Amino acid sequence: MAPRKIIIDTDPGQDDAVAILLALASPEDVDVLGITAVAGNVPLELTAKNARIVCELAGKTDVPVFAGCDRPLGRDLVTAEHVHGKTGLDGPSLSDPQMPLQEQHAVDFIIETVRAHDTGTITLCPLGPLTNVATAFQRAPDIVEKVQQIVLMGGAYFEVGNITPTAEFNIYVDPEAADIVFKSDVDIVVMPLDVTHKALVTKPRNDAFRALGTPVGVAVAEMTDFFERFDKEKYGSAGAPLHDPCVTAYLIRPDLFTGRHVNVEVETSSDLTMGMTVADWWRVTGRPANAMFMGDVDADGFFGLLTERLARL
């Protein structure tokens, strides 16, 4: 079967970096047409830089990187340097990128690419706030029905929130954008905290990355060494959750994940629960299902896949 054509929309972030590396290491499964950067974990200037750093780390300098929206649709930007460090990729020592940033705006690239391909052949893979995707849908509503699927990392239900008591970071940063995407009628697969908090980089799993002995393996281990300190202290867990690689892993091995097709709505007006993803897990509202909301992952299978693919780079 031909690899899925994807656009990775991202705000790197150490876990975003691992998700990108997994995709770039899996050309038989996914064809990365481009990487679009959005403001999120750190400001846009850094996310666009970090995406190119990751491509160069992987030796994939032919993948075009585009800078997109530098702030949410209707509010001030909230960032997460407290988790990812001042660069977003704190941990390893990585050189500034030599490959150029594309001149075209990320939103224009998304629109142009979806229009240029047959209906149902492009999958969008947002790993950060949904500003770029929502802006593309607003600006070019004709592309919405052409998108094959959106597989995104964001939201939570049973795990509630990680930036507020009720909201996951990516959705909280731009809830209006998330609302547009979830109401788009596109086939959506969601990797919420309920799944990603089960994909923990324990010491043996991180040792396996480091034991690859390659620049990629060592860098991934050093990234995780850095950002796990926050999650281990916050949650008392055995390691840091690898949020964003769940998106890429799903594209390669969907059998690793289980979930339910349910209605998901995004809170956009409440000060108390702003950005909450209200997932009708028990199907009590009667609202039509609009997303496959994942609830579990085979963590050993996930890390086995990740280690095997990263070894290729």
Image (tube, rainbow, N blue to C red):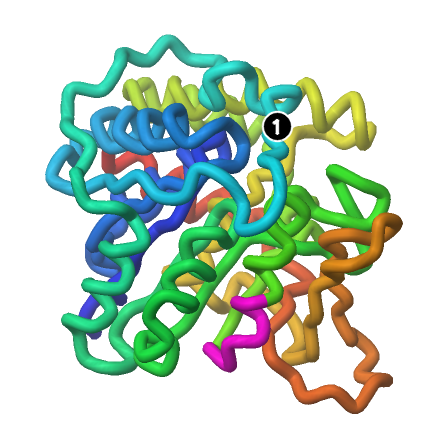
Question: Is residue 126 something one can see in this rendering?
Answer: yes
**Viewer-proximal residue among 12 and 215:** 12
Residue 127 is left or right of residue 154, and the answer is left
Q: Decide if residue 126 is on the left or right side of residue 114.
A: right
Left or right: where 264 falls relative to 72: right
Task: Find disc 1 in the rendering and name its residue.
Answer: 80
For the residue pair 100 and 152, the one nearer the viewer reads as: 100
Say which residue appears at 58% left-offset and 63% top-offset.
190
Dot 1, how many residues are within 10 Å of its Cα: few (below 14), some (14-19), or many (20+)? some
Q: What residue sits 83% from the left and 85% below the top? A: 285
**Residue farthest left in this picture:** 62
Task: Tell me: residue 3, above or below residue 170.
Answer: below
- Let me know if residue 59 is in the magenta part: no
The percent position of residue 75, horizontal first and vertical second, equals: 62, 43
Callout 1, which amino acid? Ala
Quarter occupied by residue 109: bottom left
